[in-house]
């Protein structure tokens, strides 16, 4: 082979090697926030991010009853996904307030809201969750911190039914997390949002057999779904810090709001914690 030919071949090979990484590099998820998770990190009462909070007065908004926004103070990692959380019948934001800083410290903006009336039923609570998300992304003073394309809803009792209502009305949501959900409607076959239902074994208000489990079974169009029944838990388990609930609420939120497959390990294969009576899902998610 002539020297000229050898030089030409080396140039061609070099160009190919330079071009190759663009085609073969591992794709990076732009929505990952925080370090790689561990069991300890998702069971901890606070996550990696320092948080702050601000009060949204009832008089300053329309469509819901105000609330409190919990958010990471870090601005170096870009915007965050967001979750609106609504309490149950006769409850106020204080009944589920612990969820706010716990989830926010894992890298989310969390809006724990009050309802217009403490007696509002699930359809109204669903509408109010969506109004709160619209306020959060369009008018709130932290709107620049929120990625408006990565939003989710959660709620307790009638608020859990409200989160199903919100998911049914807005299929662009990334996740719905009903907690001990109550609703007269049992068929949610039109929901097209990844949905994680958490129930309590000893719930006598919204029994798993009459509410949470039929809701889960009906989610025929949800791209992913899971059902977790907490052993010995009453209807009111979301009203105080609950490590198992938080652990998997965080994992589901990270996996589906942030598309963070690092959290897949906690959801698939199915969890076997001693605090879980029953866990059903559509594994694998990846």
Image: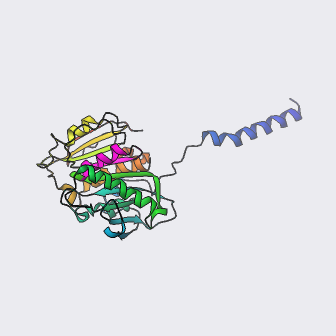
Residue in front for this viewpoint, 173 or 255: 173
Q: From the viewer's side, name the closer residue of 246 and 91.
A: 91
Was residue 160 drawn as part of the magenta stretch in this picture? yes
Q: Magenta segment, which residues?
A: 159-178
* Image quadrant in which the C terminus is located: top left
Split into 4 quadrants, where in the image is the N terminus? Answer: top right
Whether 13 is drawn above or below 81: the answer is: above
The image quadrant of residue 171 is top left
Q: How is the image coloured?
A: rainbow
Relative horizontal placement of residue 194, taking residue 200 as reference (left or right): right
Relative depth, front residue between 221 and 45: 221
User: Is 88 placed above or below 208 here?
Assistant: below
Residue 10 picture quarter: top right
**Figure label count:** 0
**Which residue reaches farthest top?**
1
* Left or right side of 232 for 245: right
Residue 15 placed where, x, y %?
Answer: 75, 40
Q: Residue 98 in the image: x percent, y percent?
A: 27, 63
| x, y percent for residue 199 | 20, 47
**Can residue 142 be seen at all in this image of the molecule?**
yes
Q: Residue at x 18, y 60 (%)?
A: 90
Is residue 274 visible in the rendered structure shown here?
A: no
Q: Magenta span has 227?
A: no
Question: Which residue is rendered at x = 26% and y = 49% of the image?
Answer: 123
Image quadrant in which you'd find residue 238: bottom left
């Amino acid at each position: 082979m002539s020297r000229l030919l050898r030089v030409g071949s080396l140039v061609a090979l070099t160009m190919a090697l330079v071009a190759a990484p663009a085609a073969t590099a591992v794709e990076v998820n732009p929505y990952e926030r925080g370090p790689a998770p561990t069991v300890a990190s998702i069971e901890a009462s606070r996550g990696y991010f320092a948080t702050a909070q601000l009060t949204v007065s009832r008089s300053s908004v329309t469509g819901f009853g105000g609330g409190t926004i919990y958010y990471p103070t870090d601005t170096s990692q870009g915007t965050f996904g967001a979750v609106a959380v609504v309490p149950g019948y006769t409850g106020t934001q204080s009944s589920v307030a612990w969820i706010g800083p716990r989830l926010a410290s894992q890298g989310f903006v969390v809006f724990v809201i009050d309802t217009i009336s403490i007696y509002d039923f699930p359809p109204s609570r669903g509408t109010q969750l969506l109004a709160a998300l619209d306020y959060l992304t369009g008018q709130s003073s932290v709107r620049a911190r929120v990625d408006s394309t990565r939003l989710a809803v959660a709620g307790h009792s009638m608020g859990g039914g409200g989160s199903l209502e919100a998911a049914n009305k807005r299929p662009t949501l990334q996740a719905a997390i009903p907690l001990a959900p109550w609703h007269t409607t049992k068929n949610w076959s039109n929901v097209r949002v990844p949905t994680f239902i958490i129930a309590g074994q000893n719930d006598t208000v919204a029994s798993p057999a009459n509410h949470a489990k039929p809701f889960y079974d009906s989610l025929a169009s949800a791209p992913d779904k899971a059902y977790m029944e907490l052993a010995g838990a009453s209807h009111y388990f979301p009203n105080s810090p609950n490590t198992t609930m938080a652990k998997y609420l965080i994992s589901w939120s990270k996996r589906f709001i942030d598309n963070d497959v690092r959290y897949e390990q906690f959801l698939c294969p199915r969890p076997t914690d001693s605090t879980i009576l029953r866990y059903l899902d559509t594994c694998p998610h990846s």
